Image (cartoon, rainbow, N blue to C red):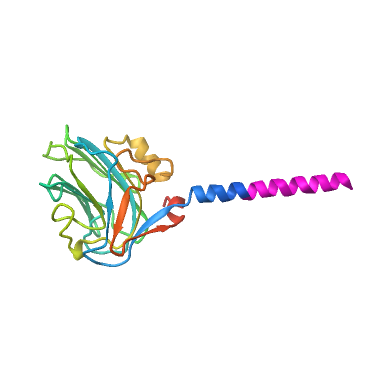
Amino acid sequence: MSGIIIITREIRRLFLLFLIFCGCFLQGNLGKIILFPKETSTDHVILKPTVERPLKQLTVCLRSYTDLSRDHSLFSIATPTMDNAFLIFPQPPKSCGVYINQEVISFNVDPEVAAWKQTCVAWDSETGLLQLWINGKRYPRRVTTSRSPIGPQMSVILGQEQDSFGGRFDAKQSFVGELCDINMWDYVLPPETITQYFHSSHNINGNFIGWNNELYSSKGNAKVLKDEFCSLYPV
């Protein structure tokens, strides 16, 4: 009988340890999502780079979920002299514009659907090479005429397109929906890393702007929500 009691206690102890482990795992991997609930000229999120220096190269990756059928801003960088120093600007259903130092490059992309979408943009000022990746697919590369670095002083905004440094938003260009896994690097990510990001971004964090660093502030009705769905992505 004593042997059975010992075994029962051991099973109970292991079960409790399992519950504690699962609880810690879920808590540590609980994701967050930024919700932009409606069309406005006020709702936005300000991202804060970890350092302030000119960007000669960059990669920006993020995930978005929206049913918008109009033009909208996903990620906007303005400097004191350029409102569109860098901008990811989808134009549903079959186009996406990327701005570099006021120059716009338009990509023909697959039709928009109401599903989570991963977008990555990479640019090198030395060569002007511009890359757009959507859901793990790289579209034909382009070359910008601009060779000037971006910054060092910059305003980084989610959910709105800046017509001046940090402001002058237009509701008709605002983002409505959900964003998550927003990361930025001051170099061009290799294709294999972008592919890895598409399949699982949980262990990837930008060195210039990192989703896990929580260096941001929300304005208006933009809400940062705890949500596991983004961490359970990909598509």
Q: Main secondary structure of the magenta part?
A: helix
Question: Looking at the rendering, which quadrant does residue 217 occupy?
Answer: bottom left
Q: Residue at x 87, y 46 (%)?
A: 2
Residue at image position (53%, 50%) is 26
Question: x%, y% of residue 175?
Answer: 26, 60
Residue 159 in the image: x percent, y percent?
26, 57
Total number of numbered discs in the rendering = 0
Residue closest to the eye, 131 or 45: 45
The picture places residue 158, in percent across and down from the top left corner, at 27, 54
4 vs 88, nearest the viewer:
4
Q: Residue furthest top?
A: 126
Q: Is residue 230 above or below residue 188?
A: below
Magenta includes 11?
A: yes
Q: Quadrant of residue 170?
A: bottom left
Q: Is residue 106 above or below residue 51?
A: below
Q: Is residue 46 magenta?
A: no
Instruction: Find residue 148 and report its image quarter.
Output: top left
Between 84 and 194, which is closer to the camera in this rendering?
84
Query: What range is drawn magenta here?
Result: 1-19
For residue 111, side relative to residue 150 (left or right):
right
Q: Is residue 220 above or below residue 21?
A: below
